[in-house]
Amino acid sequence: MLTTGPVPAYPEVLAALGKPVLYDYHPAFQTYYAGVVEKLRQALRTDNNPVIMQGEAILGIEAAAAALIARNDVVLNLVSGVYGKGFASWAARYGREVVELAVPYDEIIDPQAVREALRSRPDISIVSLCHHDTPSGTLNPLHEIGAVVAGHGAYLIVDAVSSFAGMDAHPQDAHADIFITSPSKCLGSTPGLSLIAVSERAWNKIEANPDAPLGSFLSLLAWKGASEPGRPFPVTPSIAEIYALDAALDRYTREGPENVWTRHAQTASVAREGLLGLGLSLWPKQEAWCAPTATAFKVPDSISDVALRDSLLHDHGILVSLGRGETAGKILRIGHMGASAEPGFARTIVSALSGILSRPLHP
Ligand SMILES: *Cc1c(COP(=O)(O)O)cnc(C)c1O
């Protein structure tokens, strides 16, 4: 399964899912939960406790918008793909105005363009960025954009769902005020949770926002401090998913984050080299813009995307992802996330593609 999320879970993650369910008010569970939050804090390299919400990462992204964006906010939404574009609907729901800075989906956002957008609209108070827009396989310059936004003083919301834990991407280094990720991409755990780092100043803004949801499944505030001992959870946590996350975080730490990132980068590099060697083209206009956690390549004219995907699956047992939105029909995407980030897997799919595409009448 070389998909772009969800991805195959590590064996220790699957084993953890089989542990007995603890009562959430049991002091032992509360202590355990606080330990998992602490491990997550260390993995995210933040000073304050992150929040775990009980739903796939889109929940975390929508909850971030609902909490941080107040009625008088002007949001600069950076769009280089499907997920970046999708954020606009939430920003528009909560804020006063959404300003869009968009590039074609085979390009990346230029930090200089962000600087100019902020200069021409000094009233922009929040900037939102999707770091790796997975349907395009392109990686935006997170740290450079973060520095520009910090210079302006705006808050920065980052969707790092498909980059965190597959490369060096952490909220504080990037000046991100809210940084959302998922266990089911590069951490190699199961889907079902949103992992959210929130800066101190973002918490202050959220607490001052009269429209920030409370008593709602969308409430980020409800989960603030949920790991403090003796505090009731807003709703029953997804206990098995917490076990799985814990095992994934342990594995990440044991292997060593830098080693994990290198494994992802090497796999992507092998995939790109192999695809180019077959005469295929990468979807991103420049190879330097390709993400280390997924490789998007153009489907040749001689075959449809679905036929090529099906041939990989049925003849070779390899499942990849189709394009989405604007990239649908044009590309296939190979995920290098968690357990699938192994250079050997990249070599395997390249040789499978070579076999399929060299047949006179493929598939
Ligand atoms: C996977 C992903 C998400 C989360 O999408 P779900 O449908 O909730 O899994 C958000 N943003 C990006 C960039 C992603 O790759």
Image: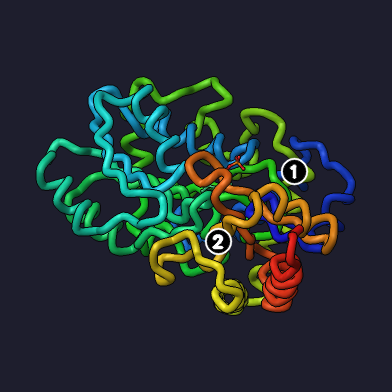
Residue at 46% across / 23% down in the picture?
Answer: 213
Which is nearer the eye, 321 or 293? 321
Q: Amino acid at mark 1?
A: Pro
Which is in the foreground here, disc 2 or disc 1? 2
Mark 2 neighbour class, 10 Å CA radius: few under 14, some 14 to 19, many 20 or more: many
- Mark 1 is surrounded, within 10 Å at the Cα level, by few (under 14), some (14 to 19) or many (20 or more) other residues, namely few
| Helix, strand or loop for disc 1 | helix
Instruction: Residue 166: give x, y in percent of width and height.
Output: 56, 66
Q: Quadrant of ligand 1?
A: top right
Q: Is residue 201 visible?
A: no
- The N terminus: image quadrant: bottom right
Residue 70 placement: quadrant: top left
Tell me where residue 350 appears, x and y as whole percent. Answer: 68, 72
Q: Is mark 2 within 8 Å of ligand 1?
A: no
Disc sitting over residue 27 in the figure: 1
Above or below 260: residue 55? above
Q: Nearer the viewer, residue 6 or 37?
A: 6
| Residue that badge 2 annotates | 297
